Amino acid sequence: MCIRDSLEQSLRGDSDDAAALADLGLAYLVAPDGPDHAAAEAHLVRAHQLAANDAALAPAILNNRALCALLAGDRELARSLFLEAAAAFADGRNRVNTPEANLALLDGESAGPDERRRAPESLEALCQALPPTSAQWHYLPTRYRLLCPSPGRPAPPDDRPRPGPMRR
């Protein structure tokens, strides 16, 4: 029995479990036999409807819906959902805004010059906010360095202390 089967079976008892629906949507998105974008989106949309007032779960579901749209090739929908998720995430808690980071990475690969110009600035701000214990601590600065240097923007310094025993 695969994870999708287990999640679908668990939903038979409670079809309004937003977290399980969101997990099932992700299971369809990262399935070993290939993604099923339509099924993933359907489950993520239903999960978001159920969790719309959940300040912790709703932005994460929106972020995953945006990833689903991006993987399905719909960059405009992905951007719109990342913006919505980033706004929902920006609730004053001290945490890294994952949808905002994803939006900046999407903008960095955009054909539009305004988006490409905005991407490094967004990533700079996010990198400054990252605590060394964050799972994104190594990932975002690396992605930032791929966007820079661009004309007039030097590559970021690599002198921040690294977490753990290895330091440069």
Image: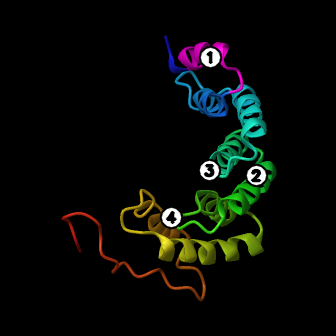
Q: Is residue 57 above or below residue 26?
A: below
Magenta highlight on residue 9: yes
Which image quadrant is residue 100 in? Answer: bottom right
Q: Amino acid at mark 2?
A: Leu
Depth check, mark 3 against mark 4: the one in front is: 3
Q: Secondary structure at mark 4?
A: helix
Assess whether mark 3 and mark 2 are in contact (beta carbons under 8 angstroms).
no
Residues under labels 3 and 4: Cα distance? Answer: 26 Å
The residue at which mark 1 appears reads as 8
Q: Residue 80: x and y, percent?
A: 79, 55
Residue 160 is situated, as x and y percent measured from the top left of the image, at 35, 78
Q: What's drawn in magenta, residue-wise?
A: 4-16
Tag 1 near tag 3, CB within 8 Å:
no
Q: Which numbered dot is residue 143?
A: 4
Closer to the N terminus: mark 2 or mark 4? 2
Q: Does residue 80 appear to the left or right of 122 in the view shown?
A: right
Judged by its main secondary structure, the magenta piece is: helix
In this figure, which residue is indicated by the disc labeled 2? 81
Q: Are marks 1 and 2 in contact (CB under 8 Å)?
A: no
Residue 56 marker? 3
Residue type, numbered disc 4: Arg
Number of residues whose C-alpha sits closer than 10 Å to that of mark 3, classed few (under 14), some (14–19) or many (20 or more) = few
